[in-house]
Image (cartoon, grey):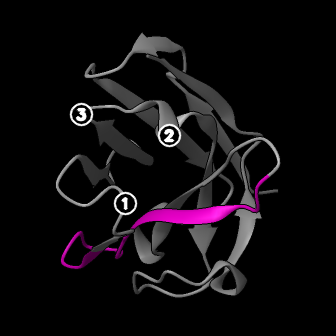
Amino acid sequence: QVQLTESGGRLVQAGGSLTLSCAASGRTFSRYGMGWFRQAPGKEREFVAAISWNSGVTYYADSVKGRFTISRDNAKNTVYLRMDSLKPDDTAVYYCTIGTYPRATTQAREYDYWGQGTQVTVSS
């Protein structure tokens, strides 16, 4: 049974920083790409960032490029999302997901397990 557990979400002021963590179990973590998606109220889930199995490739949504950084520690089975210069538009539930392939991908259909999500709220 694959489990993904996100943590680190909270209320933060605009311009602030936050780091989300996602601990994985039940699959050989180091063999698969990982991703972060988010869903704001009334909106569809959207891609945020992705990282390949060996951290060699990363992708970011245009809306977060230059502000967010995805990283992973395969020894700890954990993926991180460092978020800087946060904006109110970043308010959403953030989901961690594990891919079906080693590569990084922006496509939700290429991920097969999802965490429960962690709430990030950015106040203006």
Q: Disc 2 or 3, which lies upstream in sequence?
A: 3
Identify the mark at residue 63; answer none if there is no mark.
Answer: 1
Q: CA distance from mark 2 to mark 3?
A: 13 Å
Instruction: Check disc 2 and give the amino acid type.
Output: Asp
N-terminal label among 1 and 3: 1
Magenta stretch contains residue 60: no
Q: Secondary structure at mark 1?
A: loop
Q: Which residue is mark 2?
A: 89
The image shows residue 64, relative to residue 15, as above or below, that is: below
- In the rendering, at what x and y percent does residue 94 appear? 60, 43
- Residue type beneath disc 3: Asp
Q: Which residue is located at x 35 percent, y 29 percent?
A: 19
Q: Position of residue 74 (x, y in %)?
A: 33, 55
Residue 102 x, y percent position in the rendering? 44, 84
> Horizontal and vertical percent for residue 81?
36, 43
- Residue 84 is tagged as 3
Query: Measured along the vertical axis of the image, is residue 47 above or below residue 20?
Result: below
Real-space Cα distance between discs 1 and 3? Answer: 12 Å
* Amino acid type at mark 1: Ser
Q: Report the number of discs.
A: 3
Q: Secondary structure at mark 2?
A: helix
